[in-house]
Image (tube, grey):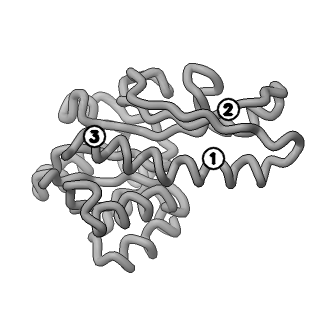
Amino acid sequence: MTNVAVFASGSGSNYEAIQQAINEGTIQATVKLVVTDKLDAYVIERAKKFGVEVLALRPKDFADKAAYEAAILAQLRARNIEWLVLAGYMRLVGPTLLGAYPNRIVNIHPSLLPSFPGKDAIGQAMAHGVKITGVTVHYVDEGMDTGRIIMQRAVDVVDGDREATESKIHAVEHHLYPEVLKYLFN
């Protein structure tokens, strides 16, 4: 059984999809910790629903990124965490965590990378008028959404309808991420 920590900054819908896949036995892993940089993130409620411990730390309460990540790393080590799963975590991972978890940090991104990296990938795709976007699961490196791609899935853009496009992307994310994690952990 692989011990993982899920990092999220928002609602945590991808975390919930992962947790459900674990509970159903699809993924051979245990989420030991949910890490968030937002004290009011809804992912905290989702984690509580599943009885998973939460570490909520505000980066601005630390001297710098290294100190923030060192505090997280101490908690990860105390729980024997083997993999970090980023699921809507809106911060770049720095050298402290990258060095501690080489090739064991994964992220999900709502585009077909390398197209539309960074924030608001869906908005970027729609502004460019593309007909197809998608979802990418990739390893995390020091860049912004530049790590080696593990798996991608295409999603048709609903012309002029961001909400419908986001809904389609989330549906794909909630299937693709558990599929990739099953492949990595089982």
Q: Picture coordinates of residue 18 (x, y %)? A: 38, 58
Q: Is residue 77 above or below residue 140?
A: below
- Real-space Cα separation, disc 1 to disc 2, in angstroms: 9 Å
Q: Which residue is mark 1?
A: 169
Which residue occupies 31% across, 63% down?
A: 55
19 or 97: nearer the viewer: 19
Tag 1 and tag 2, C-beta contact below 8 Å: yes
Dot in front, 3 or 1: 3
Q: Is residue 177 above or below residue 167?
A: above
- Real-space Cα separation, disc 2 to disc 3, in angstroms: 23 Å
Q: Picture coordinates of residue 160 (x, y %)? A: 89, 43
Q: Is residue 51 above or below residue 75?
A: below
Q: Which residue is mark 2?
A: 133
Q: Which is more N-terminal, label 3 or label 2?
A: 2
Q: Picture coordinates of residue 85 (x, y %)? A: 34, 46
* SS type, badge 1: helix
Q: Which residue is mark 3?
A: 183
Which residue occupies 47% across, 56% down?
A: 14
